[in-house]
Image (tube, grey):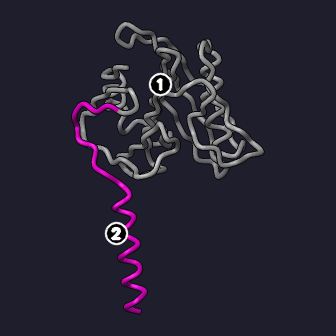
Amino acid sequence: MKKLLMISMLLMLNACAAFKLVKSQQTTVHGITLTPTSTWNKAGFNQHKKSELWTKDGLGLNELYIIGNINEGESIFKSHNKELPLPTFKKGMLPNELEEFIKTSLKNSHGGTISVTTDNMSPVELGDDIAFRLQLSYFLEHGLKKSVDALLTTKNDKLYVIMYVAPSMHYAQKHQAEINSIFESVVI
């Protein structure tokens, strides 16, 4: 019994060590400079070598993907299914092509089992550049609806994406004011 308790405690400590505190200060991640207004937790693992994954309340409850410096021919997530490849970025993609790229990336990263719907897409100013704000939604297999709020742009033939993913009920709105502030602070 003591051995089981000790193993459980060690596993819990390891789980805590997988996250690092992100302070509420200007931060640069893979070519994207942003300023969170409160602290976040950075996961010790990433979906891609050119990404960071932050959360406020825990993975699955809310996730902020910061993905930058994506070159032509690269995907935004790691591929886990060789039979269902992830789409790759192509320089010169039009806004509707970027929208489909993000939607297909999400769908294929979930094994092709979800259908991603565009709720809204609009251009926004990002300094001297034009970016796109994209709101998406999808249902997981067990019925949970997820909302996606993304800011994406290309600069110097590279793709930059900041994407907030959370359950539509409660968590999508819980940190929306901060997500808006983070998106407004972005500099590429």
Residue 16 included in the magenta stretch of the image: yes
Query: Which one is in front, 141 or 90?
Result: 90
Residue at the image position 38 percent from the left and 84 percent from the top: 5
Q: Give the residue pinned by disc 1.
A: 160
Q: Amino acid at mark 1?
A: Tyr
Q: Residue at x 33, y 28 (%)?
A: 182
Q: Earlier in the sequence, mark 2 or mark 1?
A: 2
Q: Residue at x 59, y 14 (%)?
A: 95
Kind of residue sitting beneath label 2? Leu
Q: Tell whether label 1 touches label 2 (CB within 8 Å).
A: no
x, y percentage for residue 148? 51, 33
The image shows residue 37 at horizontal and vertical percentages of 24, 33
Can residue 175 be seen by looking at this rendering? yes
Q: Residues within 10 Å of mark 1 (few under 14, many from 20)?
A: many
Q: Count of labels shown?
A: 2
In the picture, measured across the screen, residue 151 lies left or right of residue 28, that is: right
Quarter assignment of residue 119: top right
| Quarter of the rendering occupied by the C terminus | top left
**Secondary structure state at the residue bearing disc 2:** helix
Q: Horizontal and vertical percent for residue 61?
A: 45, 48
| Extent of the magenta region | 1-28
Q: Residue furthest right?
A: 83
Lateral position of residue 74 relative to residue 185, left or right: right
Rendering quarter of residue 171? top left
Q: Which residue is mark 2?
A: 13
Quarter occupied by the N terminus? bottom left
